[in-house]
Image: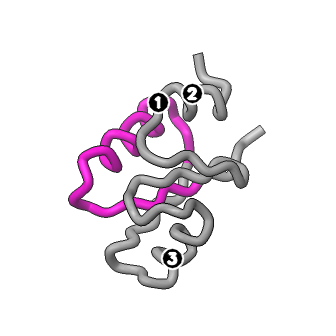
Amino acid sequence: MAKNITVYSTPTCPFCVRAKQYLKENNVQFEDIDVSENQEKAQEMIKKSGQMGVPVLEIDGKIIVGFDKDKIKEELGLK
């Protein structure tokens, strides 16, 4: 079953790039939100995560702050 995945990121953040690359390598569909362009979504991210830093991943409502490969792998059930 497909999970609902959102990546809050900015174009200049190297960990954001790595997180999105990791998802793509594993053929995981996700919505990418550029919080440097969208203040409303930036506020939403801060409210959900308590963090101002990116990336923040939301996987089916669970928040993962930063590119935490192990947590992402676990949430997505990847090998």
- 78 above or below 9? above
- Which residue corresponds to the image point at 67% horizontal and 25% vertical from the top-left? 77
Marks 1,2: beta carbons within 8 A: yes
Q: Is residue 30 magenta?
A: no
- 19 above or below 49? above
How many residues crowd around disc 2 within 10 Å: few (fewer than 14), some, or many (20 or more)? some
Q: The residue tagged with tag 1: helix, strand or loop?
A: helix
The residues colored magenta run 6-29
Q: The residue tagged with tag 3: helix, strand or loop?
A: helix
How many residues crowd around disc 1 within 10 Å: few (fewer than 14), some, or many (20 or more)? some
C-alpha separation, residue under disc 2 versus residue under disc 3: 25 Å
Residue 1 x, y percent position in the rendering = 78, 38
Q: Residue under label 1, please give it.
A: 69
Residue 16 x, y percent position in the rendering = 34, 49
- Which residue corresponds to the image point at 57% horizontal and 60% vertical from the top-left? 49
Horizontal side of 20 relative to 30 (left or right) equals: left
- Which residue corresponds to the image point at 68% horizontal and 52% vertical from the top-left? 4
Q: The residue tagged with tag 2: helix, strand or loop?
A: helix
- 76 above or below 58? above
Q: Residue under label 3, please give it.
A: 41
Rendered image: mark on residue 73: 2
The three-letter code of the residue at mark 2 reads Lys
How many residues crowd around disc 3 within 10 Å: few (fewer than 14), some, or many (20 or more)? some
